[in-house]
Image (cartoon, rainbow, N blue to C red):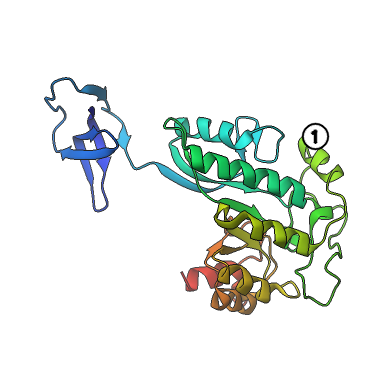
Amino acid sequence: MIVLAGGDLVLPDRILTGASLVIDGTRIAAVEPRSRVDAAGATIVDARECYVVPGFIDVHVHGVEGHDTLDPGNPVAAIASRLPRYGVTAFCPTTVACGPRELRAVVEQVARARAARPAASARVLPAHLESNFINPDFRGAQPAECLRLPPGSAALDSARVGKAGHDVRRPGSAQRARQDEAGDFSARDILDAVAAAGPDVGIVTLAPELPGGLDLVRVLVSAGRRVSIGHSGANVDEAMAAIDAGARHATHLFNRMTPIAHRAPGIAGAVLARD
């Protein structure tokens, strides 16, 4: 038994000051409205001057402490082992746009980590893909050579989209290596990798205003994915159409998307109106 004694417990409806939380095994056994709990044999943790809150769930984690999800080796497990010290107890390993080989490598790590679930590590949730189907004008640090138009659009599946010189930062060595290894692949290759991942891919970020974007939203939603609007130049009507098609998230709201203006509320306006 573990007792977190004397902390300020954050409850759904209030903050309980100077209280204690009793943990028995993997369950919360009691919440005591006092600073000390007499429990023979219990491990007492002094939580005075601390807030005691549920563990954070982060649905957008590219890495931590120098480990990136697209690094070689087993970075997902390394990230999971380090996140609890920052209060994160569950997370979605997140990728930037990449080739199908790199995508499969990350998803395989996610599958292994979800099966293993080490007690001292953050729980690994299905992956979040900042996908290849984003708007090149809003790509930020996403590698332009990995961007594609959704299949079935007016352009060929294998068409590359993007404009040179749009990066907001110089890519690091790991990102340059990923770009060098990207090679030729089609939009269909990416979607095949996502389909093969089954339940190990949870969220897909895309730009719904791309040709075929709304159809892609519907396809992903019908397959059980959560679609997030991001890295997108969609206007408010296009964003509303994506929400109607099943999109339920926005990726880093206000960042790398159309801004709010009084006559053009953009993605953020649509998301906040339909929350």
Q: Position of residue 88 (x, y in %)?
A: 45, 39
> At 31% from the left edge and 36% from the top edge, which residue is drawn?
51
State the quadrant of the N terminus. top left
**Image vertical order of residue 84 relative to residue 139, above or below:** above
Let me know if residue 170 appears in the view: no
Does the image show residue 234?
Answer: yes
Query: Relative to residue 149, is residue 114 drawn left or right?
Result: left
Question: Is 87 on the left-hand or right-hand side of 204?
Answer: left
Task: Give the image location of residue 139, x and y in percent.
Answer: 74, 56
Q: Residue at x 57, y 72 (%)?
A: 222
**Quarter occupied by residue 39:** top left
Looking at the image, the residue that sits furthest to the top is 41
Residue type of the residue flagged with mark 1: Ser
Mark 1 crowdedness (10 Å alpha carbons): few <14, some 14-19, many ≥20 = few
Residue found 54% across the figure and 39% down from its top: 113
Where residue 99 appears, x then y in whole percent? 78, 51
* Residue 68 occupies quadrant: top right
**Residue 47 placed where, x, y %?**
27, 28
124 up-or-down from 194: above or below: above
For the residue pair 229 and 43, the one nearer the viewer reads as 43
Query: Which residue is label 1 attached to?
Result: 173
- Residue in the foreground of this view, choosing between 155 and 196: 196
Q: Is residue 168 above or below residue 256?
A: above
Q: Choose between 17 and 55: the one closer to the eye.
A: 55
| Residue at point 54%, 51% (across, down) | 126
